[in-house]
Image (cartoon, grey):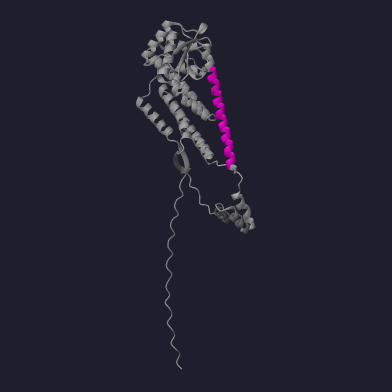
Amino acid sequence: MDTTMLIALLERLGWTSLQTALLVGLVYLVCKRLPSLSAATRCRLWWLVSLQAVFGLAWSQPLQLAWLPAPAEVAMTTTDLAADAIYPLAPEASAQLLAAAPIDQTHDIAASIGTGASPLAVWALALAALWLSGVLLMAWRTFGEWRQCRALLAAAHPCEDAALVQALQLAADAHGLRRAPRLWMSAQVDAPQLVGPLRPVLLLPAGANALQGDALDLALTHELQHLQRRDLQWGLLPALAQHLFFFHPLLRMAVREYAQAREEAVDAAVVGQHGASRHAYGRLLLQLGVAPAPHLGVASAAPSTTSLKRRLLSLQPRRSCPRVLAAALTTLVLALSVAPMQLVAAPVPPTPPTPPSPPAAVVAPAAPKAPAAP
């Protein structure tokens, strides 16, 4: 079985995982050292980590960096030379040469010509099978989440409040959206959420969890801000990276940080651009509390207590980072993420030419002796 392409895929998977780990460390260090960095910039940086992972796996010709030590020259033995000479020959000629070879070298030559699978090919098949099984398992889980999302929409009903629908349309026009999302009511959700990246539906809680007054206006502004930023579409790439690199804990952390920074960026936009009160918006976040993240969508509620605490702290006024520095950091991470890299061995230095041997001394022929006198 030809495992050349399989080994090349596993090699790209390994090098991309290593580069992703280094990029995650770089972005984490930048975000840690610059707490004044805006949430929108942090969201872009963490999204670029997912871009590097997917792009590095799809790129078949990474940028090779000759940073590894050059391999030492190894002299070929007689057995290796014989194997290289016998391999391309016909089986009959190979058998004749094997019969003529010395007894101590016959076993090594036969092993090099053997038709059985090499240990490298066996390991490549096993690792590829494990990786493909994990990807299929992640895809199956996503399919189950999609079915749950469809069941949630099937149990919901369109909003019958004409004034609320008209207010949503006016707010969508103010956000620069072509059309407002479909507004449905559901008693199975505790917080407003957008589901469906292709045809988004805005679900509002009904019954005892229904929002009223200013809380409803802030929640609608939050979800419309997600639509204006196209977070449902941009979030497909981190989801794909998480499926392909399900075994990578640092990439999973990067996806979580991307989702956290995305919500903080939307919170900052609602408070800053639309003049909402920080206290009123903080009360809304506390009212929504903690709720599980929606399947294939985004929600106003925080997925965990830690996330809710970080969002509340991000509402406090702080010194903003200069835009030039933020743009420079984004450009640096973009340059590192777009060009997949691979460490290779340095080229073997050329062998210095052998100095010419000095010419041999010319010896003059001896003169013939004169004949002796009689």
Q: Nearer the viewer, residue 301 or 133?
A: 133
Q: In the displayed structure, would residue 352 be above or below residue 168? A: below
Q: In the displayed structure, would residue 21 be above or below residue 261? A: below
| Percent x, y of residue 314 | 44, 18
| Percent x, y of residue 283 | 46, 10
Q: In the displayed structure, would residue 260 be above or below residue 221? A: below
Q: Which residues are magenta?
A: 120-148
Tell me if residue 102 is in the magenta stretch.
Answer: no
Tell me if residue 125 is in the magenta stretch.
Answer: yes
| Percent x, y of residue 152 | 53, 14
Q: Nearer the viewer, residue 299 or 371?
A: 299
**Residue 104: in sight, yes or no?**
yes
Q: In the displayed structure, would residue 289 be above or below residue 371? A: above
Q: Nearer the viewer, residue 119 or 283?
A: 119
> Of all residues shown, which one is farthest toward the left?
324
> Of all residues shown, which one is farthest toward the right?
103
